[in-house]
Amino acid sequence: MSGTSLTVVALSGGVDSAVAALLLRDAGHTVQCLHMSNWEDDGYCDNARDFHDARQVCRELGVPLHRVNFAREYREQVFADFLSEHRKGRTPNPDVLCNRQIKFGVMRRYAQRLGATQIATGHYARLTFVDGVPHLRKARDPGKDQSYFLHAVDARDLADIVFPLGDLLKSEVRDLARRAGLPVADKKDSTGICFIGERPFAEFLREYLPESPGVIRDDEGRERGRHRGLAYYTLGQRHGLHIGGAADGNAAPWYVAGKDADRNELVVVQGHDHHLLLSQYLTAADPLWVGAPPHEWQRGEPWQGHAKIRYRQADQACSVRRLAGGLLEVVFEQPQRTPTPGQFVVFYDGDRCLGGATIEHGGQHISELRAAG
């Protein structure tokens, strides 16, 4: 697409979005870039440096750069949910909601007001269209595929989206950046949640949620220590428990196996492969589909396919059926380690990402944890 058509590229200041802009410019698109800030710079989320790098990229490419601040929208539509989930003792994934609400919601509409007929990002994913309906597919690079984080984006919001990096390996992206002389060619990839930055997670969370100390008990009900508050821990967590070995001399590390909100108690077990950390099933709520749900849903039958419960996990064979109240029950062929409430189970048919749902319950119930002892 060229001529009077405008493609707006969401330019973060990193190498991926920079190469997305490079590829589109070289393909003859009329390109403008948009740098958005979603968090006020507090010394940890380095907005100033990212904007500086974005300007350098646009200067090198010879394309205009727009700057916009969506911090208010991010706090209202993403961060508020993040805190609410943590207050409930759950473990949210704000990147999924950010994609749905901000990047492909607020940002997309802003780009359209700039005159964009297409919006491009540096995500590693692919889109194909069947009868005009977008199908979200995995990227060619399995180590960088980001379809997991994009599963909740409404299909209507993908209709004018372009993912230029979907068929490239990360190594190829960096090579393209170096050959083009882009100043971010070797810039380190950002990791973790942007607004937390490099500081410890508990340190950040204390700024917003007060500590609520309680007892740590093992699966036999014995007290093992004290915790800061259930919001500060997630299922499967090992570090930060500050408890020693068992009285019988077992020196295996402890892991969080459950949270008892009624008693404000953390339940722990010893050993990475403890059976109480594994579950062959989970329930999930609020399914969101990229387009129509699987045909089996419409016939009221279980769906057989694959799913993953965390980013970069290999696809896991499973069966999914609908329960009352809009819930889904997912039964895996192989036990999964610590399905975590607040996280997402994402469904795949081959390389196509069908959508996903929020995990409500996975692993053992508190009553089962206590009975196990």
Image (cartoon, rainbow, N blue to C red):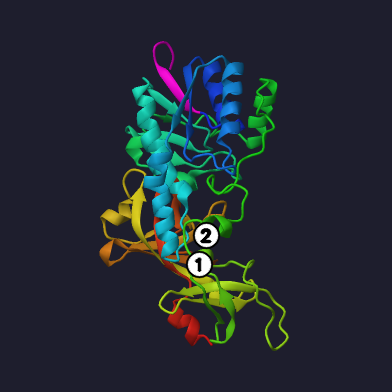
Percent x, y of residue 10 = 48, 29
Q: Is residue 152 visible?
A: no
Rendered residue at 60%/22% (across/down): 57
Q: Label 1 belongs to which residue?
A: 211
> As drawn, is 187 to the left or to the right of 357?
right
Q: Are marks 1 and 2 in contact (CB under 8 Å)?
A: yes
Does 59 appear above or below 352? above
Answer with left or right where residue 296 lies relative to residue 276. left
Q: Position of residue 129 (x, y in %)?
A: 38, 33
Task: Give SS at disc 1.
Answer: loop
Residue 19, image x, y percentages: 58, 27
Q: CA distance from mark 1 to mark 2?
A: 7 Å
Circle nearer the N terminus (1, 2): 2
Which residue appears at 39% of the width and 12% of the height?
4
- Residue placed under numbered mark 2 in the picture: 206
Rendered image: mark on residue 246: none
Residue 131 in view in this figure: yes
Specify the segment rendered in magenta.
Answer: 1-10
Q: Let me know if residue 206 is in the magenta part.
A: no
Q: Amino acid at mark 2?
A: Arg
Q: Closest to the observer: 175 or 267?
A: 267
